[in-house]
Image (cartoon, helix red, strand yellow):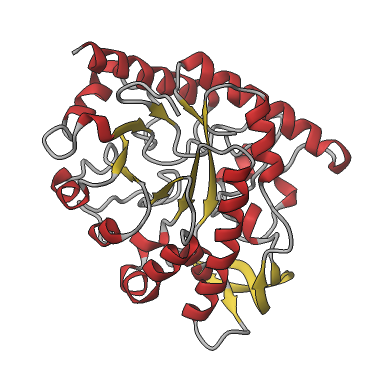
Amino acid sequence: MTLPLLPTSLVGSYAQPDWLIDRAKLAGRFPPRVRAKELWRVAPEYLEQAQDDATQLAIRAQERAGLDVLTDGEMRRESYSNHFATALEGVDVDNPGTALDRSGHPNPVPRITGPIRRPRPVQVRDLEFLRAHTDRTIKMTVPGPFTMSQQAQNDHYPDAEAAAMDYAAAVNAEVRDLHAAGADIVQIDEPYMQARPDAARQYGLAALNAALDGVTGTTAVHICFGYAAIIHARPEGYSFLPELAGSPVDQISIETAQSGLDLGVLSDLTDKTIILGVIDLSDEAVETAETVAARVRRAYDRIPREQLVIATDCGMKYLPRESAEGKMAAMAAAAEILRAE
């Protein structure tokens, strides 16, 4: 990867087009953990073609905005996690269980009925499509083993830790295959480490480390406070973050715009690249480039500029496309201001 100083990137998702997915239904429910086929507006026989077309639109939008690290926009996903989690063996998604979401509400989830296994690569075709349609640095995201273990009803394993470790083996195989297929960065999404820090310390970090075992390509982990469209309250600080200092992950993605996070926590992570969330997803209004640049400067006395990536706080899935496009352009313009300085 050849990237400029202060490269820009999405965390993962871009806004899906209204012709592809029913955005009103999407916004009116918690992120699905089992399949939610009713969200798609396109007939099943045309869905893959429509998702490919939407992915090309997402790629072009990121390039047009001037981003340096591109994702596929997660156009094929009903949520960040269920695309992968429901493709595994050992889970019954037709007869789901129930688990509490991070907001405390019960949600239908995969029911674990046997050993968790990954029978085949899940996202390699998605990655190959992204690689074929851009020459820029590319990133693919995979849900983390701890988060998936929290988004399932365990009817098989003796405890959640055992389930998380088998999820970790599945993630490890996927990460390796994604790097082999051409991914420059693979990001593991672990929002439940923030939501359930005690369990994350007990076994979640071990599961994440197992998911990274033997991986030689660049990796990232994303920890956040939840989608702003769903989770409105923001704590003043992370309940689980310094613990990642000893993890083999190369990059850590955090959100700072919506929470006004005290960046003193970064002092524990000086050996990591920080994907710094500086775009507020709770407000559809587009920030000025100078507002975004000011949010980035807050990190300068904690992390060397060479170890910072400018990014959104979380996925842009719930934003209108016009807002998402404007916010991406603001990130790129802020990077130009800061590089000039």
Q: Is residue 246 above or below residue 12?
A: below
What x and y, as percent, mark residue 66? 45, 16
Q: Residue at x 41, y 64 (%)?
A: 209
In the image: residue 31, left or right of residue 57: left
Where does the image place residue 115, in percent across and percent down from the top left? Answer: 66, 78
Q: Position of residue 264 (x, y in %)?
A: 13, 47
Furthest-top residue in this view: 340
Which residue is pictured at 47% across the width and 52% down the height? 188
* In-front residue for pair 180/257: 180
Q: How many marks?
A: 0
Which residue is drawn at the image coordinates 35% and 52% (left, top)? 225
The residue nearer to you, when weighing 55 against 180, is 180
Q: Is residue 94 above or below residue 338?
A: below
Q: Is residue 103 left or right of residue 320?
A: left
* Residue 53 visible in this rendered orientation of the protein: yes
Q: Is residue 17 left or right of residue 167?
A: right
Q: Is residue 17 visible?
A: no
Between 89 and 213, the one lying in front of the other is: 213
The quadrant of the rendering that contains the C terminus is top left
Where, quadrant-wise, is the N terminus in this rendering? top left
Residue positioned most to the bottom: 158
The percent position of residue 163, horizontal first and vertical second, equals 54, 76
Q: Which quadrant would residue 308 be assigned to in this image?
A: top left
Among the 4 quarters of the image, the one containing residue 91: bottom right
Q: Is residue 125 left or right of residue 223?
A: right
Q: Depth check: 34 or 183 in front?
A: 183
Name which quarter of the figure residue 299 lies in.
Answer: top left
